[in-house]
Image: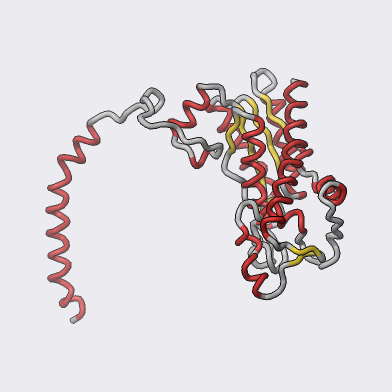
Amino acid sequence: MRTHSLLPFALALGTLGTAATLAITPGGAAAQSGEMHDMMEFPRPIDALDNVWIEELTMLEVRDALRDGTTTALILTGGIEENGPYLTTGKHNHVLRVMGESIARRLGSTLVAPIVTIEPGDPERASTPGGIRYSQETYQAVLRDMAVSLAAQGFTRIFLLGDSGGNQRGMAAVAEELTEAWRDRDVVIAHIPEFYNYGDVLIYQRDVLGIDEDPRLDGLHDDYYITSIIMNDDPRHVRLEQRIRADKATINGISIVPAEQTIEHGRKLIEFRTDATVAAIEKVVAGR
C-alpha cells in the first residue's frame, strides 16, 4: 500500500529527471568537448591577495608568487591534546596561526603550507577526550608527502617547525631523509628545532616582561605565555569571556585581564620567537 502511494511521485520524478537530462545534455556535451583553460598560462584577472597561507590563496596567486621568487615554504606541525579547562584542544595550532604569519612575513618571499594539526603518538592510547594521534609512520609520511609536493611545485627552501615536543623527532627524521634524497638537487630542507624554545620564552617573559611564572602552579597544561600568544589569534580560544564571568581569568597566579595588556605581552613573545626562528633559518641557508 505504501509503495503504491509513492508510485506517482516516483514516476513524476523520473519524468523530471529525463527532461532535465535532455535539457542539460547539450551544454554538458559542449563543456566536455571544449578545452579547459590552462591555469599555468592563464593571466590572473584580479590583484593578488596579500596573504602567506597557501590554502587561502588561489592557484594563480601561488603560481605567480613562485614565479616572482617566493620559493621558501614553511611546514608547521601542532597537535590536538588536553590543555586544561580553558584552552582548546588545538592550542598548538592556534599558536602556529600567529607564529607562521609572523615568521613568513619576516623572512619574506615565504608561504605557509596548511598546518599539520595532528601530532604523532599511539592512536590506540589516545583515550583523552578530544585527543587524536597519528602513528609515527603516518605522521612522517604526511610530512614527507607535503615536502615532496612543495618541491615539485618549485619551492626550493622548505623548513619544518613544530610547536609540540612530540613532533620534533619525526620532523628531524624526514628532513634528514629528504636532504639525502635531494643531495643532487638545488633544494634545501631542514627541521628548525630552535622554534620550539619555550624554555627561553619563560626566561624572556621573566627578565624582559617582568612576569615570573611557575608553570606548575595551577597544575594545568596551560601557561600565561601560551595564553597571551593564542589571544593574538582569538581570545575565544582561551575562553576569555567565560573566565571573566566565572572569576577565573588567571593562570598560574597571573591575571589575563586587561586583555589588551595580555595581548601586547603575546605580541612581544611572538616577536621573540620569530627572531630566534628566523636567525636559525638564515644560519641554515648560509651553511648550504
Q: In the depicted view, which residue is nearer to us: 132 or 71? A: 71
Image color mode:
secondary structure
| Left or right: 181 in relation to 13 | right
Question: In the current view of this chain or complex, which residue is farthest to the bottom?
Answer: 1
**Whole-percent x and y of residue 282?**
74, 27
**Is 74 placed above or below 209 here?**
above
Q: In the depicted view, which residue is nearer to us: 90 or 261? A: 261
Residue located 79% across and 38% down the image: 194
| Mark count | 0
Q: Quadrant of residue 250?
A: bottom right
**Whole-percent x and y of residue 229?**
70, 51
Q: Quadrant of residue 146?
A: top right
**Is 26 placed above or below 281 here?**
below
Q: In the depicted view, which residue is nearer to us: 180 or 218? A: 218
**Whole-percent x and y of residue 266?**
71, 50
| Left or right: 56 in relation to 240 | left
**Whole-percent x and y of residue 281?**
73, 30
| Left or right: 141 in relation to 31 | right
Where is the N terminus found, in terms of image quarters? bottom left
| Left or right: 16 in relation to 243 | left
**Is 223 placed above or below 151 here?**
below
Where is the C terminus found, in terms of image quarters? top right
Residue located 24% across and 30% down the image: 34
**Is 203 placed above or below 251 here?**
above
Residue located 64% across and 19% down the image: 185
